[in-house]
């Protein structure tokens, strides 16, 4: 079970795994959206805008491909952010807002 400081992102369509609220706040700072520590559609839209994509608010294959390219991972072809991609994305954004 996730700790109170962690949010299961598995309940959000297109996201798998866990990210702490602090990690999500770093992502939100990087993406330029309000820092509430919850990854919802507003955060997804902000990430999509930051990546130069159409901001639908839904994680899709184009969003995942762009994130993987940004953080230097080989494209998986997934239409969801898997655990490895989530972990690498959290590290990437934390390093840029520190």
Image (cartoon, rainbow, N blue to C red):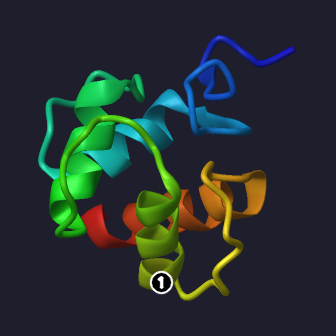
Secondary element at tag 1: helix
Left or right of 6, for residue 42: left
Left or right of 69, for residue 14: right
Left or right of 15, for residue 39: left
Q: How many marks?
A: 1
Q: Is residue 28 above or below residue 11?
A: below
Q: Position of residue 95 (x, y in %)?
A: 40, 71
Report the residue marked by disc 1.
69
**Residue name at image x 64 percent, y 18 percent:** 11
Pick whichever, 36 or 75, lies toward us: 75
Q: Is residue 60 above or below residue 2?
A: below
Q: Position of residue 37 (x, y in %)?
A: 38, 26
Q: Quadrant of the N terminus?
A: top right
Residue 71, visible in the rendered structure: yes
Residue 30, visible in the rendered structure: no
Q: Position of residue 29 (x, y in %)?
A: 21, 48
**Residue name at image x 42 percent, y 81 percent:** 70
Q: Quadrant of the C terminus?
A: bottom left
Q: Is residue 69 above or below residue 36?
A: below
**Residue name at image x 39 percent, y 63 percent:** 93
**Residue name at image x 69 percent, y 35 percent:** 18
Quadrant for residue 66, please give it. Answer: bottom left
Label 1 Cα crowd, 10 Å radius (few <14 / some 14-19 / many 20+): few
């Amino acid at each position: 079970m996730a700790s109170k400081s962690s949010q299961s992102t598995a309940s959000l369509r297109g996201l798998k795994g866990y990210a702490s609220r602090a990690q999500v706040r770093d992502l939100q700072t990087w993406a330029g959206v309000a820092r509430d520590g919850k990854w919802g559609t507003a955060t997804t839209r902000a990430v999509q805008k930051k990546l130069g994509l159409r901001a639908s608010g839904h994680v899709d294959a184009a969003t995942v491909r762009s994130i993987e390219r940004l953080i230097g991972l080989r494209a998986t072809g997934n239409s969801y952010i898997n655990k490895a991609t989530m972990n690498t994305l959290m590290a990437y954004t934390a390093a840029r807002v520190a």
